[in-house]
Each structure stands twice: as C-alpha cells, then as structure tokens.
Amino acid sequence: MVIKTKSGSKYTAEHVIITVPLSILKKGMIEFIPFLPSKKMSAINRMGVGLIEKVVIEFDKVFWDFEADFINYVSDTSGEWVRVINLMKYTKKPWLVM
C-alpha cells in the first residue's frame, strides 16, 4: 500500500489505519484507491457530525473511583453536562478524558 501526500511524499506500508474527522470523509477530501466500499460510504454519509471537544488530562495520582468507567456531572445551568471517561481502569495511568 502506498500513501501519497499532497506535497508528493510517498510512504509504503503493508497496512494503514487512517483516523480523520467524519466531516473530512463526508466531504471526500481524501481519495482512496481502491475506493471505499459502497456500504462504508453509505454509512459515512448517514452519520451526523456533532460539536464536541475532548481533552485527556494526566494527574499525579488518582483521586476518583478508579473502577468506574464514567464520571458524570450535570450542572444546574441548562446545556452544561460533562461526561468524564476514566482511562485508569484500562491504561493503569491516572488519565481522565474530559
């Protein structure tokens, strides 16, 4: 498999994992040869794009329930809701995704 960049650089690999925002795939900003299967393109085109920001924070030590998958906070203010994902359980590092 060969990956060619816009600047002309080429990279060769047996396998490639590509992670890009859904909006980039929907706009067809990346050319796949061979093309992605029609089932995959259909699924991509049916999916919605939302507004969400994710931040991974590393702490010096765990101060939360390290067995919980999620830590939720619901504010008294409408529209303010935060789901915090506990990565400690899986990475053994004091990380939270906010």
Image (tube, rainbow, N blue to C red):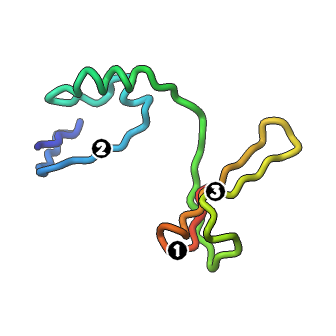
**Res 69 label:** none
2 vs 3, front mark: 3
Three-letter code for the amino acid on which mark 1 is drawn: Lys
Residue at 44 percent across and 29 percent down: it is 23
Q: Earlier in the sequence, mark 2 or mark 3?
A: 2
Mark 2 secondary-structure assignment: loop
**Res 93 label:** 1
**Res 70 label:** 3
Residue at 56 percent across and 60 percent down: it is 56
Residue at 68 percent across and 70 percent down: it is 65
Circle 1 packing at 10 Å, graded few (<14), some (14-19), many (20+), is some
3 vs 1, front mark: 3
Q: Earlier in the sequence, mark 1 or mark 2?
A: 2
Q: Is residue 17 left or right of residue 51?
A: left
Q: Position of residue 90 (x, y in %)?
A: 48, 67
Q: Nearer the viewer, residue 20 or 64?
A: 64
Mark 1 secondary-structure assignment: loop
Q: Quadrant of the C terminus?
A: bottom right
Question: CA separation, marks 2 and 3?
Answer: 27 Å
Three-letter code for the amino acid on which mark 3 is drawn: Phe
Q: Say which residue label 2 marks.
A: 18
Q: Position of residue 75 (x, y in %)?
A: 83, 46
Quadrant in the picture for residue 37: top left
